[in-house]
Amino acid sequence: MVSRRTMLTVTAAAGAVAASSPWWRSFAVPNASAAPTTCELALANGTDTNAVNAYVTGREFGTDRMMLLRADGSPYYLQEPGAPNTPLPVDAAIPLAAPGAAPVVVTLPRMYGGRVYFARESTLDFYVNPGPALVEPALHNEADTNFGKIVSFCEFTFNDVQLFANVSYVDHVTALPIGMRLQGDGDHSVAALPRSAVEAIAADLEAQAAADGYPWGDLVMRGDQGILRVMSPQNIMAPHVGQPDMPFADYWNGYADQVWETYRGKDLRIDLQGGRGVLTGRVNGDSLVFNDGSTFAKPGSWDVFTCNHGPFANIPSDSEAKKGALARLAAAFNRSTVHSHADQPNGAGAADFYTNPVTNHFARAVHENSPIGYAFPYDDVTPDGTPDQSGVAFDGNPSRWTLTVT
């Protein structure tokens, strides 16, 4: 998973305080008092089957130990295995109650880089590598033992500042949607993917493949019972990095050339938002150079789809200004607005997103069929005054986080 926000990747070193929100956003900081040490996690079954299992994974805030929660709410900390790909030695499944029954409630401790998985009519296989490191399901890989299962997950970080969560479609959209509600100082809900949305997204991408010849239809993964999930382009590219037959290898080349030629002769302005100023840049030689000294090479397909490679790589030592520019530039590429709008992100509204023939059609199809949710890593870059479409929720005093799988 790409490190798309500090919230999900910060190292919880002793005494360190994680950022209260992603560094490219200008959210109001929660109440300065520390967040509680625990929060109720309510897991509700909104499906039509009694057989749904949940799994909670992440790192313990303050110790950095990789852990899973068990059904009784107790933590299991990973132990050093005797060999790579050792099956997880404990049962970490949390069985959900029957459809429509009261949710199962466990106590969520402070964790970061966390996920809550759901599996319909099956359990998930986890493995442990030396480190110890948790090997989580690789749902794009047909060799993975979890490939044929109907699986979904959401992401969270719960630290000493707040609980931050999102419904993520960055990796895939599945036939097991999740909705959430976060209660605390506020009360915020994020709607689940609508019924039949996965089928509509799959049909859209298969039609797009017929229209432009790129393998959008290969993103659709099917099993014995129909569509399992629709993968993000970065996941079908991943096994082929550096190979000449890499899917989408040249997809963004012409668009990137157009952008570079556009800004050889005029300024590109990136508003860092939140009163942090505007960077102005032009292409000089092969690089896009901004007035603070930040530079970006011309991106390729892997760079654009992952938002974490090449010129879009997340480098901790980079200045905060460059990190902010990176997020907005990567978002403008995925939405294909950077060639036509010299002011980013405020020059282009949501109606301008994905209208260019070369664009992130996975993200376009997701947003056309879903009310809200991340469709690429910087999908929470939002023009000022525009409603957030990324499906995030955060609270500095969380008391109950309810996840409903539908």
Image (tube, helix red, strand yellow):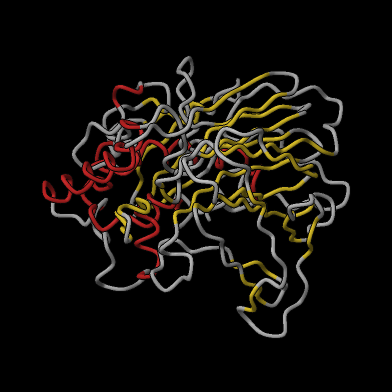
Residue displayed at 24% across by 58% down: 250
Residue 35: image x %, image y %?
82, 32
**Quadrant of residue 22 within the rendered picture:** top right
Q: Is residue 127 visible?
A: yes
Spot the residue most to the bottom.
82
Viewer-proximal residue, 287 or 241?
241
Residue displayed at 64% across by 51% down: 95
**Quadrant of residue 39 within the rendered picture:** top right
Residue 170: image x %, image y %?
45, 46
Would residue 132 appear left or right of 335 to someone viewing this image? right
Viewer-proximal residue, 307 or 364?
364
Q: Is residue 299 visible?
A: no
Up-down relation of residue 208 to residue 235 (above or below): above
Residue 190: image x %, image y %?
53, 27
Up-down relation of residue 35 to residue 227 (above or below): above
Viewer-proximal residue, 367 or 40?
40
Residue displayed at 49% across by 31% down: 279
Residue 381: image x %, image y %?
48, 31
Spot the residue most to the top.
385
Would residue 280 appear left or right of 337 to someone viewing this image? right
Number of residue marks: 0
